[in-house]
Amino acid sequence: MKRVSLLGSTGSIGTSTIDVLNAYPDRFELISLAAGRNTDLLVEQAKQLRPKRVYAAENVADVAEQLKPLGIDVVYGEKGLEELAADTDVDLVINGLSAGVGLRPTLAAVQKGTDVAIANKETLVVAGHLITKWAQKTGSALLPLDSETTPLWQTLQGTNRNDIKRILLPASGGPFFEWTKEQMATITREQALNHPTWQMGPKITIDSATLMNKGFEVIEAQWFLDLPVSKVDVIIHRQSIVHCLIEYVDYGLMAHLSTPDMRLPIHQALVHPEKLPSQIEPLDLAKVGTLSFFEPDTERFPCLQLAYDTIEMGGTAPAVLNAANEIAVYAFLDNRIGFLDIPAIIYQALEDHNPIPATEIETLFDADHWARKHAQKLVLKYER
């Protein structure tokens, strides 16, 4: 029985993870849950699943009052997430948190030697070199929870990296794949939140529309897969049926195909190395019919190129990329700036930053703090 702490239980990753955990009650015991704003759903989940502990970011007193009769402890505050992640009763932490909030609890778990399944891309984008270094030191296993990275990680277990020419990470291209630059200047919040394939939270949906999410996947792939970024390419695949491709040095290609359903990579990571029946619909290739692929257009979608550029810059630059992106995305969601202002703000923040080596986590937190303040000033310049 594997004891699990689920961070981000009310988001799309969290609810999908609960479906997978419920399918195997003899394999997993849920020890704790954590959520942000959706405390009504958090309470509902806690009443159904009966964890020992719950973290609430808001309405703490109300959550505690409702869960007190069940004997469920409620934690909160800056250290609350870290407390759940570092709990010695937990064998596996599932990080389904949104944005930069996922870094500290992941580090707390890894430093304790606890395995961590990571859906929160920002964690390895900002501090991949430090997280993986700690994991090697403590023996913590890092498992990706992602439709592209999970099957890659699973397939490449035991594979000689010299046999691999490159990997390709497919991206759907988002809702604006065929839009001109002029049309993209008029994109509204509602249009950007209408992803053609996946149902996700608002922040990651905007990241997918700008292709920043795919840029984040490129950065995290090097840490999960132990591959240089020079071997990680992106390709646009509109149908979202092919989730990853591996090209070997003999130019043979291996692809992973499935129905687009986040429960599959979650299932694959949690039951690895076994293969067990999942809850998703089988893929019918005859119904799919056509699979199409295109080169990404980094002129219309500059966030992808910004991610590659940031890797070259190194040091604290990825922390600035992540923080500036977060500020810009939320400003767009608040209807303060336009869609094309997002990459412009990120670019300027990176231009104004002088990257330094980041051998300590506090250096990255300092860079994050600087970038957020600087990006907020840049938002004021672009504000509509």
Image (spheres, rainbow, N blue to C red):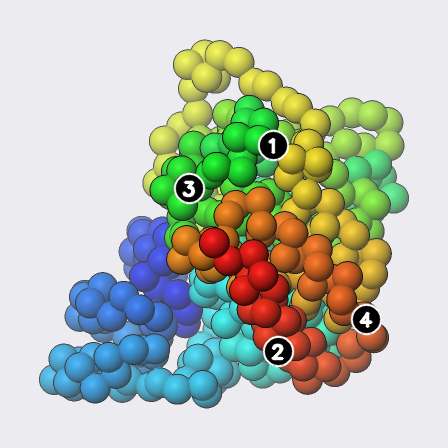
Q: Secondary structure at mark 3?
A: loop
- Disc 2 versus disc 1: nearer the observer: 1
**Number of disc labels:** 4
Mark 4 in CB contact with mark 3 (< 8 angstroms):
no
Quarter of the rendering occupied by the N terminus: bottom left
Q: How many C-alpha atoms fall within 10 Å of the one at disc 4: few (<14), some, or many (≥20)?
A: few
Q: Mark 4 belongs to which amino acid?
A: Asn
Residue under the point 20% across and 79% down: 63
Q: Give the side of residue 73 with respect to residue 191, left or right.
A: left
Q: Position of residue 124 (x, y in %)?
A: 64, 63
Of helix, strand and loop, which one carries label 1?
helix
For the residues bearing labels 2 and 1, Cβ distance under 8 angstroms: no
Residue named by callout 3: 188
Query: Element type at marker 2?
Result: helix
Residue at image mark 1: 181
Q: Is residue 135 above or below residue 306?
A: below
Sequence-wise, which precedes: disc 1 or disc 4?
1
Identify which amino acid the numbered label 3 is placed on: Thr
Where does the image place residue 266, in percent across and percent down from the top left? 46, 51
| Whether residue 273 is situated above or below residue 186 in the rendered picture | below
Residue matched to label 4 = 354
Q: Which residue is mark 2?
A: 369
